[in-house]
Each structure stands twice: as C-alpha cells, then as structure tokens.
Image (cartoon, rainbow, N blue to C red):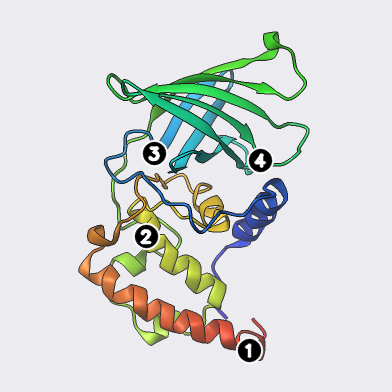
Amino acid sequence: MKRLSFLLFTLLVLIISCKSSRKTDSSDTLTGTATNKLIGKYIGNVGADTMMMYITTITADSIRGYCRNKDSDIYKPFRGAYSLENGIYKITASDDGHDNDNGVYAFSFDTNSSDVITGNWKKYGDDESARISYSLQRKTFLYSKTVGMYPEASQRALKDSDVDEYSGDDLQVIRNEIYARHGYCFKNSSEMGFFVSQDWYVPVSGDVKSELTVIEKKNIPFILKHEKYAKAHDEDYGR
C-alpha cells in the first residue's frame, strides 16, 4: 500500500507538542498578508552554524515563529511581544516550553531600509557575555509547482487512482502542500511545524486563496473528500 515518507511529520508533531504548552488561540488573526514586511523566512550564519528564523504570525499584541539551525531537525517555536515605531519593529520573544536549551530573543527589523533581522539570543541562566548575535537575510518567496512530496497535486487534475491508497493523514499533507507552495502561514502548530522543516517552504501570507491555480482549486476539494473517507475507514484497512 502506498505511503509517503512522513515519519518526520510525526516526529515534529511530538517535538512541538512537548515544547509548546499553549495551543494556538483560534481567535488569533494574522495581520500579515503577502505584503507584510516582517512575516517570512530569514537565514544567516551564526558562527559555524546556519540559523533559520520563521516569522509566521503577528496579532495585535503578539508575534510568533520558529527557529532552528540548518542541520538540526528540531524547530523551536517562540512567541513574544513587539513594538512598531517609524517602521521599525522591536521584538522580545522567548522559546516555548522549559527545555534547558531554551532562551530569549531580542531583535529588530527596519521596514524602511532592508530585509534583514538583527538581534541576539541568550540562553536562560547565562550571563550577558554569553549572548549570541545574528544578522539574518530574508529569503525571497518564489512559487513553484515542482516542490514537495507530492507536487502532482499542483500539476494536474488528480484521479481516484492517484489517491485511493493513501491514508487520511497522508492526504492531509498532500492537500496542505498545495497551500504551502503559495507560502501560506498555517495557524495549526503541528502543520506549521511540519512545513518549516521543508527547505523549500517560505511563509508569506495568511490568505492565499486568490493565488491558487485552476488545477489546485479543483484538486483541493477532491483530496479533502478522499481524506475524510480515508480517516473514517483507516482502521478498517489497517492503515
């Protein structure tokens, strides 16, 4: 029976569930759109490591995102507060959870002059001299219908035979990949945690409906129909 290689998805769900004690509030609204100047993916070198930061959600009083080193499979969700004055964001945030390696971020972003985040991070309990400074450049978003584990969902109209033998969870990922290719900022922490593990993913917007292609608009309800059926019958087929 067909299966996609989604073991990483399960692993990341467990990681994020353990590290985040708060669930995303369904009342949160993403103020960022495709034109928001802060939401996005930022990359830069910190010593011998490559740091990757994702700013994914901005509400009226908070900011959320994820951070990791390039060679690590562990993405740390963080959250904090920000101020915006004269086009300059100033953010103070902390890693979610109580891991011994967690800490506090302080960084800024000038929307008037650059696509660079500059700041520092300090591990809980360390003194000021242990602060790690960073400068991260925004990664440009480019839509591509060839990325992902199942790019066919953005390339052609799917048939029953294409999806019949996938599990409900696999079909959910196949469906969400369509949105992810357009840079959608997922509000569900498990889904976002999965996609920030994909090197091709660049979050840019909380609403990508107008960006979907004709083929994608046709495939999404088609996949969802099979997804619901599969989830209702997965145990019957031993999936």
Q: Is residue 190 above or below residue 129?
A: below
Q: Nearer the viewer, mark 1 or mark 2?
A: 2
Q: Which secondary structure lies at badge 1? A: helix
Check contact, mark 4 vs mark 2: CB within 8 A: no
Alpha carbon distance from label 1 to label 2: 28 Å
Q: Which secondary structure lies at badge 4? A: loop
Which label is found at residue 39? 3
Q: Position of residue 208 (x, y in %)?
A: 30, 57
Callout 2, which amino acid?
Tyr
Q: As rendered, which of 77 and 44 lies closer to the eye?
A: 77
Q: As rendered, which of 113 and 180 lies closer to the eye?
A: 113
> Which residue was labeled with disc 2?
179
Q: Earlier in the sequence, mark 1 or mark 4?
A: 4
Answer yes or no: is residue 230 visible: yes
Alpha carbon distance from label 1 to label 4: 38 Å
Q: Earlier in the sequence, mark 1 or mark 2?
A: 2
Q: Earlier in the sequence, mark 4 or mark 2?
A: 4
Picture quadrant of residue 207: bottom left
Which label is found at residue 71? none
Going by the image, does 17 lie left or right of 92? right
Q: Is residue 227 above or below residue 94?
A: below
Q: Position of residue 121 (x, y in %)?
A: 61, 22
Q: Position of residue 220 (x, y in %)?
A: 35, 73
> Which residue was labeled with disc 4?
96
Callout 3, which amino acid?
Ile
Q: Nearer the viewer, mark 4 or mark 2?
A: 4
Callout 1, which amino acid?
Tyr
> Which residue was labeled with disc 1?
237
Badge 1 crowding class, 10 Å Cα cut-off, few under 14, some 14 to 19, many 20 or more, is few
Q: Which secondary structure lies at badge 2? A: helix
Q: As rendered, which of 164 and 104 lies closer to the eye?
A: 104
Q: Earlier in the sequence, mark 3 or mark 1?
A: 3
